[in-house]
Image (cartoon, rainbow, N blue to C red):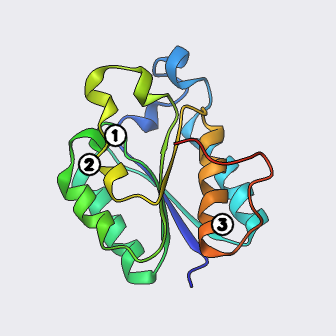
Amino acid sequence: MTRSVYVLNGPNLDLLGRRDPVVYGTATLADVEELCRQEADRLGLRLVFRQSNHEGELIDWVHEAFDVGAAVVGNFGAYTHTSIALMDALEVLEAPVVEVHISDIHAREEFRRHSFVGLVADDAVVGQGVEGYRIAIRRVAELLGAGAPDENGPTTR
């Protein structure tokens, strides 16, 4: 059983805090990384936190997670809705995969309502702001048997 979690962020998430704060909030990607690091440390998980605007690089990191048996928390941005290649890469993971979205993709444009990632993910946390990352890491810990159930209730799918 793995004790590692890769938190992978897709295109435009490097602009958090500057890009459409009404939708995405004012927290920066560095703030999100710190939040994830604190939660992973609390749960005894090793964190790998990365961001790329390039689909192939994200897929390479999913392959890396596969090679080391790590779980994945993924906010793949727009690739969620378009990338069959990313879905295929995630599908082979034996460790948990939890999809996360800062905004409620189901309440936005129609094209955002379909998630290729969601077809292979074990769970999804949607519309919880950056707090969704903490919830997703807790869910990974639950799926790994590495942490207590989320004291704030179930995740949001």
Q: Which residue is mark 2?
A: 54
Query: Would you say 50 lies left or right of 133 here?
Result: left
Report the front residue among 55 and 120: 120
Q: Residues within 10 Å of mark 2 (few under 14, many from 20)?
A: few
- Residue 60 in sight from this viewpoint: no
Query: Residue farthest to the bottom?
Result: 1
Does residue 121 sit above or below 25 in this rendering?
A: below
Badge 3 amino acid: Glu
Instruction: Say what secondary structure mark 2 lies in.
Output: loop
Q: Which residue is mark 3?
A: 142
Badge 2 amino acid: His
Instruction: Say what secondary structure mark 1 lies in.
Output: loop
How many dots with numbers?
Answer: 3
* Residue 22 in picture, x, y percent from top left: 54, 14
Q: Residue at horizontal 61%, vertical 37%? A: 130
Please say if the residues under marks 2 and 1 sit with CB atoms less than 8 Å apart: yes
Please say if the residues under marks 2 and 3 sit with CB atoms less than 8 Å apart: no
Mark seen at residue 11: 1
Report the front residue among 104 and 56: 104
**Disc 2 from disc 3: Cα separation:** 30 Å
**Disc 2 from disc 1: Cα separation:** 7 Å
Query: Would you say 119 lies left or right of 72 here?
Result: left
Q: Residue at horizontal 41%, vertical 73%? A: 65
Q: Residue at horizontal 58%, vertical 41%? A: 156
